Image (tube, grey):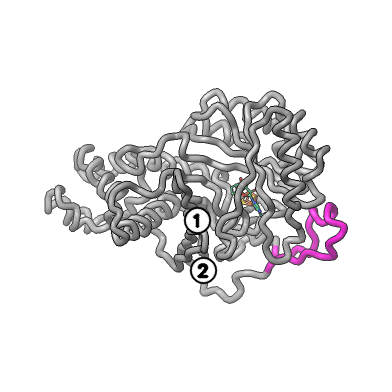
Amino acid sequence: MSVNLLDFDANGLTAWFAQQGEKPFRARQVLRWIHRSGEGDFAAMSDIAKSLRDKLAGLAQVLPPSTLSDQLAADGTRKFLFDVGKGNAIETVFIPEAERGTLCVSSQAGCALECAFCSTGRQGFNRNLTTAEIIGQLWQANRALSADKVSSGIPGDRVISNVVMMGMGEPLANFDNLIPALRLMLDDNAYGLSRRRVTVSTSGLVPAMDRLAEACPVALAVSLHAPTDGLRDKLVPINKKYPLADLMAACQRYLKVAPRDFVTFEYVMLDGVNDSDADAHALLHLVRDVSCKFNLIPFNPFPQSGFHRSPAERVRRFASVLIEGGIVTTTRKTRGDDIDAACGQLAGQVLDKTKRRLRTKTDFQSILPQVPQVSPIRLGADLPS
Ligand code: SAH
Ligand code: SF4
């Protein structure tokens, strides 16, 4: 069976080359061709001996997920939909800004963690993405974006300067496939990003946060969303397993090796649910021993979510309580919402392998007395298998 070279980081590729009787520097050359030059065709790797190119063509391939669609929003945000087989598709979003270009990358087809306000979580879980499927999003987006640059007459540098693992899925629940992908992002022979420019966002898988600190400490964002265990249990159910005190302690441990001297807490602003002044004051108390910044995310609606976005004035007031408490707080601009590319709207297509679609009532309805019934979204029924 042909080996997909996108599955290997530098060490993995060197080991595979060694198995084929090839030297480490050859592996390095091929790594550069694949990731720095975005080349998937061995025949085009011009400084590699013809005999090795032919050998590679017989044994291996460079196989990223194929692009199903590529949409551009009015504000320049670009959303890619990639096929990951068997009726599943994932989304990747490029967000251009004056100073940087951020790619938001998916880690799983769906998500098993069922956060109440998240479209990905609501639709179920199919499987972990492979390393090739994770890094393949970067590979494909890079090619598409640099092709644009060349055609617009601006050749040269890469447009992707930052990567955030904030697309579909919980990256730390797919740890073993995530780490080689992160290492490729950081590798000078691949994407060469600094550790500060690669961010893993987690809903708070405490043991995996410790493992990340050891294996590949990149910047960390933690999806907090509630100041108390009572509320967080409902919004982010993994909190029942790793409650807030454990999560705060894990953040403090992570900070000892983090490339930045703060953890970013993400906080989705849900009207009447977690957005009161009292909630903001409780947050100040909760994070008192953790060096952190807050990023408030106005809730992005999706069909039948049952939640509403906090009014802009409420978000401002909430932010000012945190700022007065001494915490740097930003509010995320909503980008690409005309193409459903905003945080939490990424749905792709997931053939759910869990039983959740059969459930009629979920936990969080108890915090939404005004909402009559939130029925699970029906997805995937008409997808090819
Ligand atoms: N699973 C990871 C990363 C993916 S989600 C995590 O939960 O951190 C990226 C961010 O978008 C998280 O902070 C998540 O809570 C937030 N999010 C999810 N649904 C949202 C929605 N509908 N509106 C705004 N933000 C949302
Ligand atoms: Fe999964 Fe993150 Fe969505 Fe929660 S917010 S369901 S962890 S993708």
Residue 350 in view, yes or no: no
Report which residue position mark 2 lands on.
Answer: 87
10 Å neighbourhood of mark 2: few (<14), some, or many (≥20)? some
Residue 354 in view, yes or no: yes
- State whether the magenta stretch is mostly helix, strand or loop: loop
| Viewer-closest of 119 and 281 | 281
10 Å neighbourhood of mark 1: few (<14), some, or many (≥20)? many
User: In front of the other: label 2 or label 1?
Assistant: 1
Rendered location of residue 267, percent (x, y): 68, 43
Image: magenta residue range: 357-377
- Of pointers 2 and 1, the one earlier in the residue sequence: 2
Q: Is residue 358 magenta?
A: yes
Rendered location of residue 214, percent (x, y): 50, 29
Q: Are marks 2 and 1 in contact (CB under 8 Å)?
A: no
Under circle 2, the secondary element is loop
Q: Residue at x 28, y 49 (%)?
A: 156
| Viewer-closest of 273 and 10 | 273
Q: In the image, is residue 109 above or below residue 27? A: below
In the picture, the disc for residue 93 is: 1
Q: Residue at x 78, y 57 (%)?
A: 362
Looking at numbered disc 1 in the image, what kind of residue is underneath it? Val
Rendered location of residue 334, percent (x, y): 60, 54
Q: Residue at x 62, y 55 (%)?
A: 344
